[in-house]
Image (tube, helix red, strand yellow):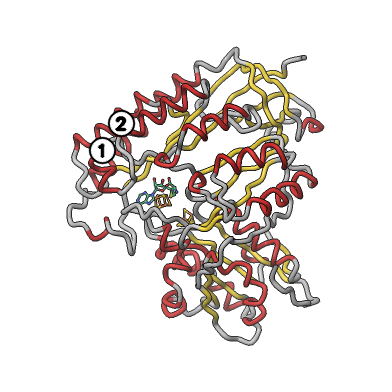
Amino acid sequence: MPEISASSEMRGVYISTYGCQMNVNDSERMYTLLEMQNYNPVVSPEMADLIILNSCSVREKPVHKIHSEVGRYKKLKSLKPNLKIGVGGCVGQQEKKALLRDIPILDFVFGPDNIDELPQLVDELDSGERVARAKFHHQEPYQIQTLVRNPGVSTFVNITKGCDNFCTFCVVPFTRGRLRSRDDQEIVDDIKRLVDRGVKEITLLGQNVNSYSSSRGMNFSSLLRRLAKESGIERIRYTTSHPKDFDQELVDTMAEFRPQICDYIHLPVQSGNSEVLEKMNRGYTREDYLKKARMILDGLPGVSFSTDLIVGFPGETHEQYLETLSLLDEVPYESIYAFKYSPRPFTKAARWEDQVTEEEKSRRLTELIEKHRKIAFNLAKTYPGKVLNVLVESKDERHEGVVTGRSTQNKVVHFKGEDSLIGETVPVRITKAFPSTLYGDREQT
Ligand code: SAH
Ligand code: SF4
Ligand code: F3S
């Protein structure tokens, strides 16, 4: 744990978060660390003495987004000269000092591996110095006790950081560094502490969680078994898993601990064409992926899937793209996250000549999303009449007397119920279904 200095005056901190769940979790960590430093989270930048942009560089114009958000704070800074503005996250790591050079009103830059140094870093700012801290820490195992202000019913727990896969389109290995796994005992203790704070569900977090490997030789399946048996947590989810590392042992483990380990798998495929997959360096073919999906469905009937897809990877022909489209007929994805390929710094594919035009990428993306929309509507029709066990997470802000939770398949379900149900798992009979949301009535038992 970092050292905390004692400053008595209360100041406001505002964090603007972009990107993946890891960044959401990291922002929560920043708030917790800064709270110990007498920084109060505030809801608008106007109220802040410290503004942090927790940035993402995975797709589309990240540096441009930072310039435009920081630009909006120019006036604030002239009204409040002591206001400090910093950039953290993956763009911080990627650009380092270049951001300070290009944005004069920026006070500091730091990388995802330097979050625990934030308390000292903001202290240093008081001297008027501009600070850049974007160095990876390579120690193994890496330690990171979950820091979250109000964990609620469901929270995220990092188990790995970084990634060694070097998919040719992806910047993450360059912004998050090499793969590191947390010690399994540290994870058990961490989750036990969260259970003591009332948490019922955790999502194990990493860029490729099923490449987890502890210094004691534990793989992801053995970690799951240990957590299921020893941590006392009611539900376990995880994200993201890589198809190449998804094996029969993991299916068997999920089946053995059903429903404690939830029936939902985010299994990013990226493309339905084997040649494109090879150029992406994904480590599997279309056939391998489909085989894995069948293996999962055989071992875990009723499991629900989601995926990530990229259209317009360099050199992707129309025929190759059609194989991505047809994959949607083969795997019953409840949801998809589809993106236009965007060239990223440091990556191999960005240097390839045969880039697909923007118009073609947009056309493919629209068609893919439209096709999935229809599939999702048809899948939704299978829900009415089913009874799902829903872990209630909160009250529905828009409707009095209605609560919201998720089924083990990760479907969001709204139903009439008291606030006292928050944290309980209750059977709900589905009466109405839309692709992203289900409605139902509590089943009396
Ligand atoms: N570790 C995860 C992905 C993390 S990035 C995995 O391997 O599946 C989240 C998603 O962003 C990726 O799955 C991919 O679909 C998308 N993505 C990453 N780099 C991209 C790029 N250069 N252009 C478009 N989409 C990209
Ligand atoms: Fe990026 Fe590939 Fe690693 Fe995922 S597995 S983070 S896509 S390099
Ligand atoms: Fe973005 Fe970094 Fe996450 S690039 S998606 S914030 S790992």
Q: Are marks 2 and 1 in contact (CB under 8 Å)?
A: yes
> In front: 369, or 199?
199
Q: Is mark 1 within 8 Å of ligand 2?
A: no
Where is 38 relative to 285, above or below? Answer: below
Q: Position of residue 360 (x, y in %)?
A: 23, 43
Mark 2 highlights which residue?
287
Mark 1 highlights which residue?
274
Q: Amino acid at mark 2?
A: Glu
Q: Amino acid at mark 1?
A: Ser
Where is 139 relative to 83, above or below? Answer: above
The disc label shown at residue 440, or none: none
Q: Position of residue 302 (x, y in %)?
A: 52, 21
Which image quarter is the N terminus in?
A: bottom right
Q: Position of residue 81 (x, y in %)?
A: 62, 80
Query: Do we see residue 144 in this rendering?
Result: yes
Where is 136 relative to 335, above or below? Answer: below
Q: Secondary structure at mark 1?
A: helix
- Between discs 2 and 1, the one toward the N terminus: 1
Q: Secondary structure at mark 2?
A: helix
Q: Position of residue 204 (x, y in %)?
A: 59, 45
Query: Do we see residue 407 in this rendering?
Result: no
Residue found at x 30% / y 31%: 287
> In front: 182, or 58?
182
Residue found at x 45% / y 55%: 163
